[in-house]
Amino acid sequence: MTFVAEFTIPGDPIGQPRHRSRIAKKADGSQFIANYDPSNAVKRKRLIGLLGAKAMLGESPFAGPVACTVEFWFSVPISKRRKRTPVEAGWHTSKPDIDNALKLIFDSLSGIVYDDDTQVCSVVCHKRTCHQDDEGKTVVRFWEIR
């Protein structure tokens, strides 16, 4: 039987934002360019890493090729909710792009679920909008391909 690491990330999915840059000064007064991730991405990566480590149940990271399924579920904005005819689940066709959302997850789990994200060889991914009473989430499953 194949071990499957499965976990759910609470909250609306976000994409991997672009790195930011700023000019910083050294102690001697010289300047350099410092690159950094925006704070919301750092917090989300930390959360995904913790959830991934918990899902691995103490197992070491997968060493071979890895397959995954990812379901991004976005909540319905308050402005779009209706009382008489509730908004049903459907496809989510706006931002973030599916590849940026996947990149955030793949980067967060390197060294935890697998050694490097280059090991991910098969991906099935969906971007959906929840029923209006449900909260956004991301459901992730990883397993090693034999």
Image (cartoon, helix red, strand yellow):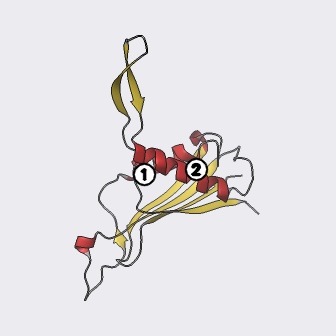
Q: Nearer the viewer, residue 99 or 56?
A: 56
Question: How many angstroms separate mark 1 from mark 2 (CA)?
Answer: 15 Å
Query: Is 54 left, or right, of 94 in this rendering?
Result: right
Q: Nearer the viewer, residue 96 or 64?
A: 96
Secondary structure of residue under mark 1: helix
Q: Check disc 2 and report its element: helix, strand or loop.
A: helix
Q: Which mark is residue 101?
A: 1
Most extreme residue toward the left is 79
Q: Is residue 133 above or below residue 108?
A: below
* Residue that numbered label 2 is attached to: 49
* Image location (x, y in percent) of residue 44: 47, 51
- Give the answer, above or below, for where 107 lies relative to 144: above
Outermost residue toward the bottom?
84
Judge from the rendering whether residue 47 lies leftward or rightward of residue 82; answer left or right. right
Residue at 41 percent across and 44 percent down: it is: 39
In the rendered structure, the answer to whether residue 30 lies left or right of residue 143 reads left
- The quarter in which the N terminus is drawn is bottom right
Estimate how packed mark 1 is, as few (under 14), some (14 to 19) or many (20 or more) residues with alpha carbons within 10 Å: many
**Viewer-nearest of labels 1 and 2?**
2
Q: Amino acid at mark 1?
A: Ala
Quarter assignment of residue 140: bottom right
